[in-house]
Amino acid sequence: MLQLQIIRQDRDGVKKRLAVKYFAELGVVDKVLELDDQRKKLQLEFDNIQAKINTSSKEIGQLMAKGEKENAERLKQQVTSLKASLQPINNKLSETERELQNELVKLPNLPSQKVPLGKTPEDNVIIREGGNKPKLPAGAKPHWELIKQYDIVDFETGAKITGSGFPLYKGKGAKLQRALIQYFLDYNTAAGYTEYLPPFMVNETTAFGTGQLPDKEGQMYYMQTDNFYMIPTSEVPLTNIYRDEILKDADLPMKLTAYSPCFRREAGSFGKDVRGLNRVHQFEKVEIVQIVHPDTSYETHEEMVDHVEKLVQSLDLPYRILNLCGGDMSFASALTYDFEVYSAAQDKWLEVSSVSNFETFQTNRMKIRFKDTNGKSQLVHSLNGSSLALPRILACLLENNQSDEGIKLPLILHPYFGDSMLRN
């Protein structure tokens, strides 16, 4: 959530930055400031009346001590009248504060000055590329055929158990999933991230804190009886660990990692781009989150990008890193770099990670602060990244490494999987 003081300090600048994200309701900025003015006016009126009540109450005591009961009773009646006038003002103040909050949450995060202009994915800027695209043998197959050939993922039974888009991993497919998860977690913890295993369901306050609500409620699975949401990523519970806390400057940065299944409705997804593992409703992912001092968040962002890049490189996959343009960014992000790996049999790039800096947008919602060296409380910055999402990584590993003997696995996975190859 944007900070009010930032909007008040530079109304036109805020509108200009929001336009980079193609936010169409710029009038919300004016509405926010109008409501904040109303709130301040009502608060001042309330405080002035309360001050009169407090002064009169002291005066009543003094009059009673002097034996001036008649004057004291007259003043009591005035105080009673003043107290009665407070309630409608307080009601209006509460109503105005609710309306102000409702308008504030409509505003997305301001994009960083590093965000390129553009409206669609085609306008994203390639930062760099790495790895070599493989030359596939004749008769090479896309991963949805390979998983049938090697009998490692069963979409039909998954659909019978739950529904379309819920894959059932089996045998060596399940083992390879486990190997990837363990390797990713080991890689992250070796870099100083503390491992967590968070709840896979969260309450409304938690979903609001990271910006999933009210922006993405249509994409989340919701349990009405308990008012719980299935998590779309472990970023949501991880970042909320520090909600409503004041951290010590010396404790920063906080580095967290977690494995979790991720649940996304992906409403409206259809066609060839969602075949096989390209887009599913439940998938596994390992996440990294950092809570940092605001002065170091962009340096930390680059470090996290470098961390994910080295992880992708260790899997011997061709990749590229994109700086997302304003129109392709998420509601909550200030700057996002996407990682895509090349799927050889499909001849297309598949996103496997987003590394984002949210600045104070999430921490303002969650009230995560720290005390600086002067003892003043400030909001920390939050960042997160996928390290990594498994389905498309698996799809590319299968397609890019297929041979007549089997699927050749990258060297780093051999001890985790217990073999150098996935065989029939």
Image: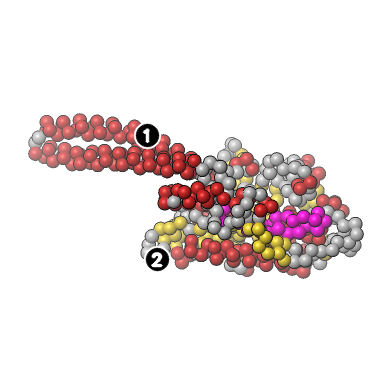
- Give amino acid for label 2: Thr
Residue 272 sits inside the magenta stretch: no
Q: Which dot marks residue 91?
A: 1
- Color theme of the render: secondary structure
Q: Is residue 203 above or below residue 83?
A: below
**What is the distance, in whole Å, between disc 2 and disc 1 at their CAs?**
39 Å
In the image, what residue occupies the spot 23% across and 39% down?
52
Magenta part mainly helix, strand or loop?
strand
Q: Is residue 194 above or below residue 364?
A: below
Check disc 2: other Cα within 10 Å, few if <14, some if 14-19, many if 20+.
Answer: few
In the image, what residue occupies the spot 38% across and 60% down?
376
State the image quarter where residue 69 is shown: top left
- Give amino acid for label 1: Asn
- Residue 175 appears at what percent x and percent y? 76, 58
- Residue 88 appears at what percent x and percent y? 34, 32
Q: Which dot marks residue 375?
A: none
In the image, what residue occupies the spot 52% across and 51% down?
17
- Residue 154 appears at what percent x and percent y? 80, 48
Check disc 1: other Cα within 10 Å, few if <14, some if 14-19, many if 20+.
Answer: few
Residue 344 sits inside the magenta stretch: yes
In the image, what residue occupies the spot 27% across and 34% down?
83
Please state the extent of the stretch shown in magenta in the rendering. 333-353
Position of the C terminus by quadrant: bottom right
Q: Is residue 403 above or below residue 93?
A: below
State the image quarter where residue 219 is shown: top right
Disc with the residue nearer the chain's start (2 vs 1): 1
Q: Which dot marks residue 373?
A: 2
